[in-house]
Amino acid sequence: MNKKVIFLDIDGTLTEPGSNQPPASAVWAIEQARKQGHYVFLCTGRNYDMLSPLLKYGFDGVIASSGGYITFNDKVLYDCPMTECQKKTAMDLLEQHGIFRTVECMDGSYTDEGFKEFLRNHAGEGSNSEMLRWREQIEKSLNILPMKEYRGQPIYKIVFMCQSEDQLVQPKAILVSDFDFCIQDGNHYGYVNGEIVNKQFDKGKAVAKVCEHLQIALSDSVAFGDSMNDLEMMETAGLSICMENGSETLKKMADAVCPSVKNDGLRTAFLKYHLVSE
């Protein structure tokens, strides 16, 4: 069998969303794949700081910040934060339109406290209390700090949340030349959730960069994901596999669907597609 490059999203794929603990079956699959000569990369929207609890499980490299930062064997292959002008324009526009921001830097992430305050003030309305619990859990588990602690470090990506897509109309119109807006589908909380990603990179471009560096054909790459921010990665890889717990839209375009992260999906797929053997 040709040597493969395997790309794993984290939240909803390798781990349950917001968790840093993959199931034992996934750890086994990664170890066995590497023993059999394949490369295994994390390919995630998380910034590099958020990856530290997972690196102990053994990976050949990481694609962080949705493709904005790439390493292989601890060597940096690509590093592309926003320019100061891009950063100021995007941050100001989102704030002006009441859009809550989480900025991702190399050394940490910082979030607008206003969103949680809004949820607290409307905690009895619909799913607001559930959303508040989810946000507080995510921020704690991923060490996301309040925006007041942000000191102007380079930003690789902005995660946004707002009540209506109407709030995004003007920011999109102004930022469209530099950024893509990736909006997650199926948000049952009733809020619009998404990411602003520099058009110079995405997970798909990152997959191609890694394969070129390793001199491995794209046809020998395998991508695992679960949400729409994995779309370009799935479109670029030779084989794309969506988790059963993933986006219905992504499932339709993927080459295959495997069991959920809770049900040993990675181990099942690694065995089925002969990336490992029992």
Image (cartoon, rainbow, N blue to C red):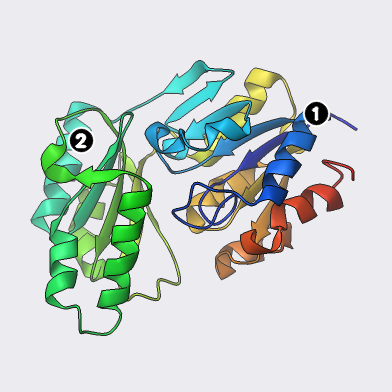
- Does 220 sit above or below residue 145? above
Q: Secondary structure at mark 2?
A: helix
Left or right of 142? Residue 170 is: left
- Tag 2: amino acid: Lys
Q: Quadrant of the N terminus?
A: top right
- Tag 1: amino acid: Lys
Left or right of 71? Residue 184 is: left
Question: What label does residue 22 carry, if any?
Answer: none
Question: Disc 1 marks which residue?
Answer: 35
Expressed as whole percent of the image width and height from the top left, the position of residue 228 reads 50, 57
Question: Disc 2 marks which residue?
Answer: 87
Q: Quadrant of the C terminus?
A: top right
Crowding around mark 1 (Cα neighbors within 10 Å: few <14, some 14 to 19, many 20+) is few
Q: Work out whether residue 234 or residue 28 is closer to the camera in this orientation and state it.
A: 28
Expressed as whole percent of the image width and height from the top left, the position of residue 241 reads 69, 54
Answer yes or no: is residue 61 visible: yes
Q: Work out whether residue 5 or residue 253 is closer to the camera in this orientation and state it.
A: 5
- Does 251 sit above or below residue 272? below
Q: Work out whether residue 153 or residue 31 is closer to the camera in this orientation and state it.
A: 31
Mark closer to the observer (1, 2)? 1
Expressed as whole percent of the image width and height from the top left, the position of residue 98 reads 13, 61
Point 11% across, 45% down: residue: 92
Expressed as whole percent of the image width and height from the top left, the position of residue 121 reads 11, 74
The quadrant in which residue 245 appears is: bottom right
Point 39% across, 38% down: residue: 199
- Does 60 sit above or below residue 111? above
Q: Secondary structure at mark 1?
A: helix
